[in-house]
Amino acid sequence: MKRSTDRILTTHTGSLPRPKPLAETLVRKDQGQEYDDDALMRDVRVAVKDVVRRQVEVGIDIVDDGEMSKPGYSTYIADRLTGFDGHAPRKPPLDIRDYPEFNAAMARMTGPQTLRRSTCVGPVRLRDRGPIDDDVANLREAIDEAGALEGFMTTASPGLVSAFQPNDYYPTHHAYIEAVADAMETEYDAIHRAGFVMQLDCPDLAMARHTGFQGLSEAEFLKRAQHHVEVLNHAVRHIPADAMRLHICWGNYEGPHDHDIALAKVAPVLLKAKPAALVIEASNPRHEHEWSVWRDLKLPADKLLVVGVLDTSTNYVEHPELVAERIERFAGLVGRERVIAGSDCGFGTFAGFGKLDPAISFKKLQALAEGAAIASKRLWPKKTRRVSAKAGSAKRAKAGRRTQPARTRRARSGARGPSAPRRR
């Protein structure tokens, strides 16, 4: 995993806006409707190349495939694993369940959530490794063409799968999540062997408190989160810590979020996870203040933070100076080399759903890169001065050579002056 050794590196959380025709095909596939599989594979390959190129063009260092092949960052596994079927209606999050008018207004803006939330109804095993092989091949080809600094790929953690796909088969939640972990190991291994940084998406460690696991008490939730981390660590036991990062969030949607569990309560659990980097929210109105958690809770020396400096629930384009300010805030707490600039969450979490405009999303990523450049100049001032001084010395030396009398310059170079007598 690349680190910010001489400047602040940039990345994001994973999903990016899919081309509309591709999103429509993914939705049809997800709903069991007819679609052309060969055409879908071609469209995904083209979309991955385009989205990687655009990331590089706006200044993103650590890029991914934008999740172009997936209908959703968590629900895609129903096509890759056995044991899932049907559709489980979504539970309204605790923070918005009492606001029906707000829900209706948001649905008009974002479109309805049509994604399939399957239920576990049988043994969970790997169905087909073809999709993950296609994903890594597409991303490798796109990165090689675009010349990105580094690539990462997102994947669902065992706990995330259980938070979206309820269990109707296994006798206990423990048995269910452990079966999911065993089935997902092939995907984890494939991503690592392909040479990408693996991002394990783990909203089950935060968001699920008020969504999928809202029936648990806070103490019960934290106990479950601890078990999820233990299962995750076992599933990635053969993968080096510095080849992985872990993403948590409280839900990528506009809403009150006044039922979100505090970062201070889940952070000790997060620090027990094996991945070396934590990808955290740090810019939306509900969680921006939690930067102070890292002032009181010491970040272990072997871990770093990918801090969200873009709010992915709004079309506001952050000013680069604000981005720089957010970056510097964390650098002052944990050290500049242990900070990478990212986004709170994804820009296209589910195909065909969301209110972020695609063009504005990339404008936000450009602001991220510009803000990181500003912060880098402030965080590495001595390096900047050394470069400037060296360049200045070279300019002065060159200027000095130009201002020397012509006869002196010719004498030093061994050239004969125009009036010197010729030897015969």
Image (cartoon, rainbow, N blue to C red):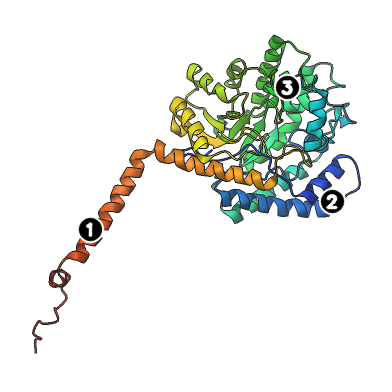
Q: CA distance from mark 2 to mark 3?
A: 33 Å
Q: CA distance from mark 3 to mark 1?
A: 64 Å
Note whether 251 is above or below 394 in the view shown.
above
Badge 3 density bin: few <14, some 14–19, many ≥20, Cα 10 Å: many
Name the element at disc 3: helix
Write down the quadrant of residue 132 in the picture. top right
Name the element at disc 1: helix
Of all residues shown, which one is farthest toward the bottom?
A: 424
Task: Report the residue marked by disc 3.
Answer: 208
Residue 218 in sight here: yes
Q: Position of residue 362 (x, y in %)?
A: 63, 46
In the rendered structure, which disc, 2 or 3, sits on the residue that comes first in sequence?
2
Residue nearest the viewer, comparing 197 with 371: 371
Note whether 308 is above or below 231 in the view shown.
below
Relative placement, left or right, of 271 versus 68 is left
**Which numbered mark, 2 or 3, is in the foreground of this view?**
3
Dots 1, 2 in contact, CB < 8 A = no
The disc at residue 397 is: 1
Location of the N terminus (image quadrant): top right
Residue nearest the viewer, comparing 216 with 242: 216
Task: Report the residue marked by disc 2.
Answer: 37
Amino acid type assigned to the residue bearing label 2 in the image: Asp
Q: Position of residue 156 (x, y in %)?
A: 71, 32
Amino acid type assigned to the residue bearing label 3 in the image: Ala
Query: Residue at left 49%, top 38%?
Result: 321
Note whether 401 is above or below 157 in the view shown.
below
Q: Position of residue 406 (x, y in %)?
A: 16, 72
Dots 2, 3 in contact, CB < 8 A = no
Query: Residue at left 22%, top 66%?
Result: 402
Write down the quadrant of residue 117 in the picture. top right
Residue nearest the viewer, comparing 2 with 390: 390
